[in-house]
Image (cartoon, rainbow, N blue to C red):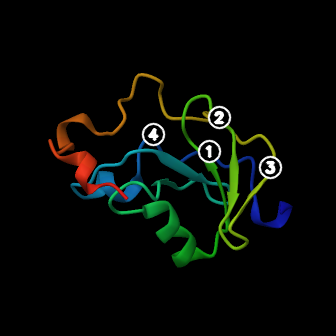
Amino acid sequence: MTVDVDPTVPPSGTGCVECQEGDGWWVHLRRCAHCGHIGCCDTSPAQHATAHWHETGHRYMRSFEPGEDWWWDYAEGASVAGPDLAPPDARPADQPVPAPRDRIPTNWRDLIH
C-alpha cells in the first residue's frame, strides 16, 4: 500500500472538488490517500470519489467524515488499514450533510443512490 499512499499530502479542500466547481452537492466525502482529492461518496448523485479512482488509478481512499477513520481499496473492493494522513482528517464538523446547504434540492433523498 505504501507506494500508492502519500500521508504528507493535505486534502484538496473541505468539499467535493467537482461538485464545488459545478453546481453539484454531496452526501458524504471521501479523501484520496494518494493525492488528497476530496470527492463525494457513492450515495451522492455524482459519485466523484469513485470516478477519481477510475480516472487516476488511485486505489486507496479514506472517509473524510468527522469521527470516521475507515479506508477502502477500490481495486480489491474491500476495507483496508492505512496510516494517519496529513490534517485535517475530516470535513469541518459544522459543515452540513448533505452539502452545500444552498444547493440541496428539497427531494434530495429521492436522488441519492
The type of residue carrying mark 4 is Thr
> Who comes first in sequence, dot 2 or dot 1?
1
Residue 44 screen position, x and y as percent? 37, 54
How many labels were placed on the picture? 4
Q: Quick check: 23 above or below 58? A: above
Q: Residue furthest left?
A: 106
> Who comes first in sequence, dot 2 or dot 4?
4
Q: Is residue 104 left or right of residue 79?
A: left
Provide the residue designation for mark 3: 82
Residue 19 screen position, x and y as percent? 32, 55
Task: Say if mark 4 contacts mark 3, CB within 8 Å.
Answer: no
Provide the residue designation for mark 4: 14
Q: Which mark is residue 10?
A: 1
> Who comes first in sequence, dot 3 or dot 2?
3
Residue at 41% across, 22% down: 94
**Badge 4 element:** loop
The mark lying in front, picked from 4 and 3, is: 3
Q: Quick check: 35 above or below 56? A: above
Residue 73 screen position, x and y as percent? 70, 63
Label 2 and label 1: CA atoms lie apart by: 6 Å
Closer to the camera in the image, 104 or 31: 104
Provide the residue designation for mark 2: 87
Q: Quick check: 23 above or below 76? A: above
Residue at 32% across, 59% down: 45
The type of residue carrying mark 3 is Gly
The type of residue carrying mark 1 is Pro
> Who comes first in sequence, dot 3 or dot 1?
1
Residue at 56% across, 42% down: 64
Task: Say if mark 2 contacts mark 1, CB within 8 Å.
Answer: yes
